[in-house]
């Protein structure tokens, strides 16, 4: 028996018990007459003691030879500590060791395995298994497990069945590039890894399973923006005989359950906002509503003076930054420089300081009267002490820039409190999205998303106006879930494919199986998928998903621990009938 207890378990009441413990040597403190060893496992740290008085000389010498991260087993007696450590669960006791065996010696680890480590990110990624021994990483993995358990519990209690769908499939249209896998048995042909189980879950509804979920890996070959992973996990769900309202209620229930069980937070009914409203008031389809700073469009108030920058702009829009009137000139210049960086790309910013005495001081005093600025303050909701920041230009770009500024200001003012949770549904998304370069239309969600009732005909006349039965669940400025009510009618699906530029043959080749299934009694259905990695990170009060993934990839999509991707040998290439292009 390797152990009778874990290293986090023993307390004062266990004094005088004989125990066996196994774990890793965290630290050896050799004071000459006494040697203390911190023994660590997943559950905690227990102090071992060897001393000249009570420990045989041979055993004491062995203890002195222990190095960091040696795996050892000890047998001994629990004794009361003379100087107790209230920071440690086991801090009242220590183990007077009577037998020691080294189960496996260890090389000196490349970084210290403690809460505060000296290892940089790259090194810790290369030795991820060592990093996982550290509390900050280990705790996040345990936290993730707790979240997934709660998801499974809630959904199965609500009648959902967990079904696995295949990984070796063919292209699913979530809008990213596929990862492909060559087939040896069918030479010259390739599987694609699922970007999501979208078509399969719809087929499960045709199969009559009614309520499905799966905690599932999805694969998207995208350029990795910060904090994206090429393989990530979804809580993927689908239901039959549902309308949008049923889905929103079901998954609001799940989210509410998670907030309560995991964070002890009870939230009111989630607000709902249309996509158009979100874009207009926050410049963003995933607004962080933990704080205000709503957009106020100022065109009518600002476009009647000699200020040509505004007069020629499609949109003049501002926000009131709380307390911002106290920013120094240097701080405001800093904000303007921040806005001008290529990542944001604004040309400049007009600002108005709302002084405590009710007067205004602006960067455009030459063009505007105090009474004009007063109206801007009313429109943006600015109070004395606030700073009104105004951007102008074409609608989409200006909104995006002001949205970035809004988030940055919130960050600087500490308004993005990670232990506050503000979920909301964004609904009524456009069905289609125009590629400005090619003029082609893409499905904003995916091609199986249904248009709002009665809007199918609009596709021919005004495709931009068509709204979809599509919704996103947003939490603290992050899209944590998205889904739609699907098309379940073959004719409608064909019309959609046509509008998305698929020829009949292409649609048949790629999605013939689904269209065929729709002819055998497809029930009305819809669903949603949550990004589990991000959901877990936000519930954990963090913004980066990487720490919540046991073995994440780096920003170039590499696993630096196993060194993947890697070339394959020639024999494998030949077997697959593949040849690498000569440079
Ligand atoms: N398959 C979709 C996605 O991955 C989610 C859904 O529509 O249910 O975004």
Image (cartoon, helix red, strand yellow):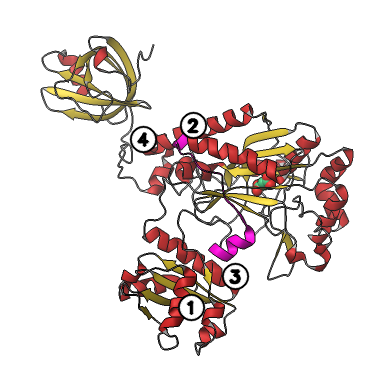
Image coordinates of residue 314 in percent, x first then y, are 60, 78
- Look at 48% across and 39% down and name the residue there: 266
| Magenta extent | 262-282
Ligand 1 within 8 Å, label 1 CB: no
The C terminus: image quadrant: bottom right
Q: Is residue 265 magenta?
A: yes
Q: Is residue 377 visible?
A: yes
Of 157 and 202, nearer the camera is: 157
Of 545 and 559, nearer the camera is: 545
Image coordinates of residue 204 in percent, x first then y, are 76, 35
The residue at which mark 1 appears reads as 347
| Residue 146 marker | 2
- 2 and 3 marks in contact (CB < 8 Å): no
Image depth: mark 2 or mark 4 in front? 2
Q: Secondary structure at mark 3?
A: helix
The residue at which mark 4 appears reads as 135
Q: Is residue 237 magenta?
A: no
- 2 and 4 marks in contact (CB < 8 Å): no
The N terminus: image quadrant: top left
Q: Earlier in the sequence, mark 1 or mark 3?
A: 1
Q: Earlier in the sequence, mark 4 or mark 1?
A: 4
Structural distance between the alpha carbons of marks 1 and 3 = 15 Å
Q: Earlier in the sequence, mark 1 or mark 2?
A: 2
């Amino acid at each position: 028996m390797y152990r009778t207890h874990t290293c986090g378990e023993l307390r004062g009441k266990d004094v005088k018990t004989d125990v066996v413990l196994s774990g890793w040597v965290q630290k050896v403190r050799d004071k000459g007459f006494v040697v203390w060893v911190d023994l660590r496992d997943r559950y905690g740290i227990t102090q071992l003691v060897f001393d000249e008085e009570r420990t045989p000389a041979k055993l004491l010498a062995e203890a002195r030879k222990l190095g960091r991260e040696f795996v050892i087993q000890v047998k001994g007696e629990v004794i009361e500590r003379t100087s107790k450590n209230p920071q440690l669960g086991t801090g009242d006791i220590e183990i007077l060791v009577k037998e020691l065996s080294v189960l496996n010696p260890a090389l000196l680890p490349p970084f210290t395995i403690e809460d505060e480590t000296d290892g940089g990110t790259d090194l810790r990624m290369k030795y991820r298994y060592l990093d996982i021994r550290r509390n900050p990483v280990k705790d996040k993995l345990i936290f993730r497990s707790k979240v997934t358990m709660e998801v499974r519990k809630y959904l199965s209690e609500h009648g959902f069945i967990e079904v696995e769908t295949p990984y070796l499939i063919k292209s699913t249209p979530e809008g990213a590039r596929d990862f492909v896998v060559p087939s040896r048995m069918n030479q010259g042909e390739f599987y694609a890894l699922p970007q999501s189980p979208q078509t399969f879950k719809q087929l499960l509804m045709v199969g009559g399973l009614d309520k499905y979920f799966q905690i599932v890996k999805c694969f998207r070959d995208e350029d990795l923006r910060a904090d994206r992973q090429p393989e990530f996990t979804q809580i993927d769900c689908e239901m039959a005989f549902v309308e949008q309202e049923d889905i929103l209620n079901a998954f609001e229930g799940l989210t509410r359950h998670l907030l309560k069980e995991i964070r002890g937070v009870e939230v009111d009914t989630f607000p709902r906002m249309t996509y158009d409203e979100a874009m207009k008031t926050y410049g963003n389809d995933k607004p962080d509503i933990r704080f205000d700073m709503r957009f106020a469009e100022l065109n009518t108030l600002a476009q009647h003076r000699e200020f040509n920058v505004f007069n020629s702009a499609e949109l003049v829009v501002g926000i009131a930054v709380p307390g911002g009137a106290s920013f120094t000139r240097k701080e405001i210049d800093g904000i303007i420089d921040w806005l001008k960086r290529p990542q944001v790309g604004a040309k400049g910013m007009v600002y108005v300081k709302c002084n405590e005495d009710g007067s205004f001081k602006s960067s455009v005093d030459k063009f505007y009267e105090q009474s004009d600025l007063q109206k801007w303050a009313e429109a943006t909701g600015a109070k004395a002490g606030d700073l009104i920041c105004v951007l102008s230009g074409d609608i989409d770009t200006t909104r995006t820039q002001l949205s970035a500024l809004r988030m940055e200001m919130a960050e600087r003012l500490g308004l993005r409190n990670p232990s506050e949770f503000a979920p909301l549904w964004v609904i009524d998304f456009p069905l289609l999205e125009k590629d400005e370069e090619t003029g082609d239309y893409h499905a904003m969600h995916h091609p199986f998303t249904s248009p709002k009732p009665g809007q199918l005909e609009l596709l021919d006349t005004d495709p931009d106006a068509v709204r979809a039965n599509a919704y996103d669940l947003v939490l603290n400025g992050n899209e944590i879930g998205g889904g739609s009510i699907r098309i379940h009618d073959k004719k409608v699906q064909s019309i959609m494919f046509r509008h998305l530029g698929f020829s009949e043959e292409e649609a048949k080749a790629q999605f013939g199986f689904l269209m065929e299934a729709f002819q055998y009694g497809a029930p009305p259905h819809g669903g949603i998928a949550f990004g589990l990695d991000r959901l877990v990170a936000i519930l954990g009060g963090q913004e980066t998903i990487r720490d919540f993934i046991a073995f994440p990839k780096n920003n170039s999509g590499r696993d630096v621990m196993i060194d993947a991707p890697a070339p394959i040998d020639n024999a494998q290439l030949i077997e697959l009938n593949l040849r690498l292009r000569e440079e």
